[in-house]
Image: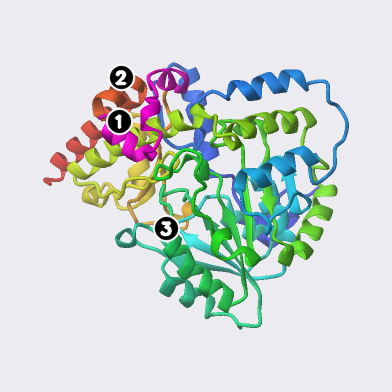
Amino acid sequence: MDSTNHDKLFEPEYVTVEAARNLAMNEQIREMKANGQDVYNGCLGQSPFPIPQAGLDALAKYAGQNLYEAVLGIKPLREKIVQLHGHQPHFSEDRCIVSPGCKELAWLLFHVLKTPVYLVSPTWVAYEPCATASRKQITWIQTSFDCKWKVTKENLEAAFSKKSKDQAGLWVFVNPDNPTGQCYSKSELQELAGVCREHNVMVLSDEIYGLLSFDILPGEVYNSMADVYPEGTIVSSGLSKWASAGGWRLGYQLYPKELEHVLVRVKAAASWSYSCVAAPIQYAAIAMMDTVVSNDCAYVRKASIVLCAISNFLTKRFNEYGVKCHNAESAFYLLPDFDILRSEKIKCGQDLTDAMMKEAQIAMVEAGPCFGRPETELTVRLAYIDFDGAYALSQVNLDESKSSLTTRQYVEECNLDEKFVEKACPRLYGGMTRLFRWIEQEKSRIGR
C-alpha cells in the first residue's frame, strides 16, 4: 500500500481531527513522573477522590453479572437516574440511555443528526472534534471574561439568527461549565430557553458536574436547562466527576418525549457500537446513586467543600498577582487570564503553558483553539486535582448543625481558608505556591 500521503486514506473531516491535547499532555506527565521528574498536573479533569465505598461494595457483589444487558441499560439503573435528576414527567426510564461514558453518546448523537451545531467559546475539548468528524456546520457562540464566560441572550440570538428559523439545530451547553467552573442561575436559563424555543434549537445539556455545585443545599437539585426548556433539552451526565469513577466509563442521556424520535436513532447506533455497558458497573452505579437520592451522601458534600475551599484560595491569590480569575461555582476548574505576562517571550497560550512546564514544572492546557478560544489569548484551564483526595476528605469534619448551609456558606462560616488547603491538600498547595513564585518572577522580568 502506498503510504506516501497518509491523508488520502481518510475522509477530509478526519484529517484535521487530532488527539485530545489534555489527554496527550497527561500521558507526557506520566512519563515524566516515571522518570523521576516532579510535575504538577493541572491539565486533566479527573476527580482526585476515591470511589465511594457503596460503589466498591456493589461492584464486588455483582462482579459475576456477565450477560449482555439491554442497549438502553438495565431498568433499575435507568429508574434511579430519573429519580436522581428529578425532572419527571418530562424524563422517564424508557427515554434514558446508558453508555460507556458521555463522550460516546455525544459522538453518536452528532452522527445521527443532520443539523448545524452551536458550541460555546470556550467549551470542553471533545465537542469541536466530534462535530467536525460528523461533518457538522459549527457556529461558535462568543463569551468574555466580563460576562464570567457565560452565554448571554444577545450572543445566543446572534448565533441562531444565522440559520433559518425552520431549520433545527443542536446547541451543546455545558452547565456547570468546563473549562470555567461557572453555573447559570434560573433566571439566566429562562432567558436562554426563550431564544432556543423561538429558533427551534435542541439543547444537549452537559450536566456532569451538577452534583458538585457549591451554591446549592445538601439534597437540593441544581439549576438545569431541563427546568425551563424541558421539551427541547437532552440531559447528559454520568459517574466520572461526582463519584470519581471516570475509569468505570458510565454516562447517560435523558430525552423528553418530544425528542423520543432522536433517541430511537441514537439507540440504533449504540446497538452497532458498544452494545451495552458492563453489567457489574451498572449495578454498582445504582448503589452510589442511591446514596445521593436518599440524601445520605456525606462523600459528595465533603468533596464539594474541599473543591470550593481550593477555588476560593486560588482565585484570591491569582487576582492578588494580577492574573484575572473568576471564582468557580462547581467542579474543579478555573480559567485564569495571564495577559499580565504578555511579552516577546509569551505571545500566545501555548507559549505560556510551555514556559510554565519548562520553568516551573506546572502542566496546564491553554484555552486557545482546543477549547474554542483565540490562539493569542493567554487564558489557561487549571484543573486543580493533583492532590490526595482520600486524605483531603479525612480533613473535613462535617458539622451536621450546618446542614442548612450551601457548600460555599459552609466553607466561609468554618473558615476553611488557605491554611485548610495547605493542610488538606499539601501537594496542590506546594504546586500552586511554585506557580505563584513563577508568576512573580515573570512579572519582575518584564517590569510589571
Residue 409 inside the magenta-drawn segment: yes
Secondary structure at numbered mark 3 = loop
Neighbour tally class for label 2: few under 14, some 14-19, many 20 plus, Cα within 10 Å: few
User: Residue at image x 21%, y 45%?
Assistant: 319
Foreground mark, 2 or 3, reads 3
Q: Name the residue under label 3.
A: 185
Which residue: 38% across, 58% down? 149
**Residue 234 drawn in magenta:** no
Whole-percent x, y for residue 166 in the image: 65, 83
Q: Compute the Cα span from label 1 to label 3.
A: 30 Å
In the rendered structure, which segment of residues is drawn in magenta? Answer: 388-415
Find residue 187 and report its horizontal and vertical position in percent.
Answer: 42, 64
Q: Which mark is residue 432?
A: 1
Measured in 3D between alpha carbons, the distance from the residue under mark 2 to the one under mark 3, in whole angstroms, is 33 Å
Quadrant of residue 415 in the image? top left
Q: Quadrant of residue 59?
A: top right
Near-viewer residue (126 or 275): 275
In the image, is 342 to the left or to the right of 285?
A: left
Q: Mark 2 points at which residue?
A: 423
Can you name the residue that lies furthest to the front here? 401
Q: How crowded is mark 3: few (under 14 residues within 10 Å), some or many (20 or more)?
A: few
Pointer 1 or 3: first along the chain: 3
Residue type indicated by callout 2: Lys
Q: Is residue 295 above or below residue 33?
A: below
